[in-house]
Image (cartoon, coloured by chain):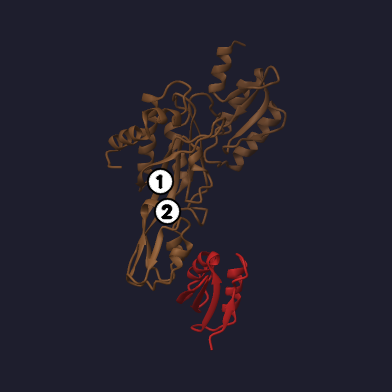
Amino acid sequence: MKEADYKELKKGGMMRQREAGHFSVRLHVVGGQMTTGQLCAIREAADRFGKGTVHLTTRQGMEIPSVPTESLASLKEFLSDSGVGVGVCGPTVRTVTACQGCRICPSGAIDSPALADAVDREFYGKPVPHKFKVGISGCANNCMKAEENDIGIKGWIGPAWNKEGCTFCGVCEAVCPTKIVKVSEDDGRVSVDLAGCIGCGDCIEACPTGAMEEETRGCQIFAGGKFGRVPSLGKRILGVLRSGEEAIAAIRAAVDFFRIHGKPRERFGDTLRRTGFEALENHMTERMGKSA
Amino acid sequence: MTPMLDITRDVCPMTFVKVKMGLSKMTTSEHLEVRLKEEALKNVISSLKSEGHKIVRVEKQGEIFHMVIEKSETRSSTA
């Protein structure tokens, strides 16, 4: 097989294995969600075309290793008939990871799987200068490690203090993990420094009287993170986005920026360090038609 | 006299379990005073709220919080 053919196969999620003539076949998984029907089909596929094993990847994906070259076409057909897509590799938008979100998790602020589906539908497998990963955490607990992704999303619950009902008991200040809530009974006020707020909502949840209320719910967006050989964390950009549609618009603008400014085999974060994060924010603000 | 429960030496989930057990021995509208530390505040208060109990008063004394809870009609809980 020619090197070009291997590259083409890799783009389609079939990765050459150390063992000659064998491939590890990546499957299409969105936010780590699989039906039992799909799992049964994957089990059968691994038995019939591989060596009866499945590999769980670090980003909620699955691969069937040890598939001989001559079985690739029939494996693909079998999976497709069973409602299992084949994954992608190479310079494309990769598997979108997500937590279980607000429909399942008591901490969830946003519906991460629904957002992951929307991102997947629009961007999965689409060409970009280098691999591009999107991870979605439903809340500030950040189980999906938003800052490790080229674009990371994190659910947000923003507080607002109302004087009425406040007894200045100090619970909000005590539970705030970043210590940006300050109770000053002498001045008759509680201050919330939103610039340092991580949107966890603990002050709201713990307030005994309801004086600390939820004012905003949405998500924050992080750009330029990656792991691998030289890890770097993504930086928070833009303000709080209020809806899934806004988050999608933000990702659309970011992908567009990467296509314009990214060099081949340059990760998004490296592009941003070259152009400056402000250039991305300006581009996004313009494309999204809103102020940052 | 208001019964007093000290959970300053307990960790989650025993903090709320003890509060719940304390409340279960009481009748509706009775008060229970709880002494607790900062790390137990969020979970205990959010569980009490979700079970419908009323937090009458919270006061900080040094590192310890004193909380007075008014027992409400028990309702099914997810806490």
> Is label 2 in contact with label 1 (beta carbons under 8 Å)?
yes
Q: Which chain is brown?
A: A
Q: Looking at this rendering, what residue extends furthest in the top direction?
A: A2
Closer-to-camera residue (A194/A51): A194
Going by the numbered disc 2, the residue's amino acid type is Gly
Q: Secondary structure at mark 2?
A: loop
Residue A199: give its label.
Answer: 2
Q: Chain of mark 2?
A: A
Answer with the quarter of the image where residue B77 lies: bottom right
In the rendered structure, which amino acid carries the disc numbered 1?
Gln
The disc placed on residue A220 is 1
Write down the colour of chain B: red
Q: Are marks 2 and 1 on the same chain?
A: yes
Q: Tell me where residue A253 appears, x and y as whole percent.
A: 35, 33
* The quarter of the displayed image where residue A179 is located: bottom left
- The span from disc 2 to disc 1 (Cα, nearest Å) is 9 Å
